[in-house]
Amino acid sequence: MGERLGVFGGTFDPIHVGHLVTAVNVRHALDLDRVLLVVANDPWQKAALPVTPAADRLAMVEAAVAEVAGVEASRLEIDRGGASYTADTLATLGRLHPGGELFVILGSDAAALLSTWERAEEVRAAATLVVVTRPGADRKAPPPGWDHRVVEVPRLEVSSTDLRARFTDGRPLDWLVTDPVVDVIRQRSLYAVGHMASPWSEPS
Ligand code: ATP
């Protein structure tokens, strides 16, 4: 029997505990063999916004999942280059895993926008949609006609946008991002952390 593969795409700028809790809980709820956190190379939905280089975002995701069973970082979209379209990613994964079953995992905010996706019809045909309830935006259904499953995960009120604001302001980030991610951020001086007071509480 082919593998049951979760595909959780994102900018992950940075990856946070909301993403990790989602990946682990969807894997469990749907009995998936693996969940791939697919790091967007060029997130076209965020074209107008500055985004941390893909190599740095990938390093954070790899660090975050190193000790997490059944959850892996995928560099597929980075290696492909250009704009990151899920339709292309599913086509590649379909070739790499013949006979496998693909599940595209989305926050419900993202699911509501599915019809705006590039080649949405191909996505619909290639995978089962998994809509995860997301803080502040849950219960938005995907457009009619999309076969989907809903998975409830603990509601964690955290977003990458808020985290970046916290970096800028020097507010605490403890427990919102995991320690291995903190290490990568420090080593690479991401989010200008190397140039400001530490946003992590120092041990007393
Ligand atoms: P930003 O705030 O920059 O938009 P984000 O926190 O939404 O970032 P993304 O990398 O854009 O993170 O999200 C990737 C996927 O994770 C999307 O499907 C999004 O809906 C989902 N997601 C983001 N935050 C959470 C959360 N706290 N709980 C569950 N899913 C989440």
Image (cartoon, grey):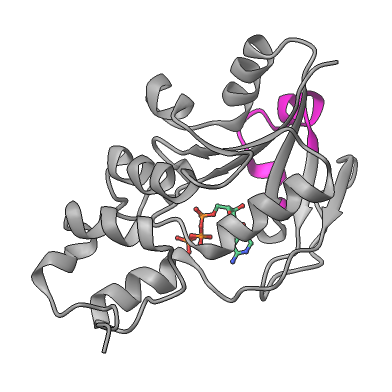
Q: Outermost residue, bottom direction?
A: 204
Q: Is residue 114 left or right of residue 12?
A: right
Q: Position of residue 105 (x, y in %)?
A: 70, 45
Question: In the image, which residues are magenta?
Answer: 111-128
Toward which corner of the image does residue 136 lie, by quadrant?
A: bottom right
- Dividing the image into four equal quarters, which quarter contains ligand 1? bottom right
Q: Is residue 86 left or right of residue 131?
A: left
Q: Main secondary structure of the magenta part?
A: helix
- Which residue: 21% across, 60% down? 186
Q: Outermost residue, front direction?
A: 204
Q: Quadrant of the C terminus?
A: bottom left
Q: Position of residue 81 (x, y in %)?
A: 37, 24
Q: Is residue 110 visible?
A: no
- Which residue: 39% across, 57% down? 14
Relative to residue 174, is residue 151 depicted above or below?
Answer: above
Relative to residue 109, is residue 30 depicted above or below?
Answer: above
Q: Position of residue 18 (x, y in %)?
A: 58, 64
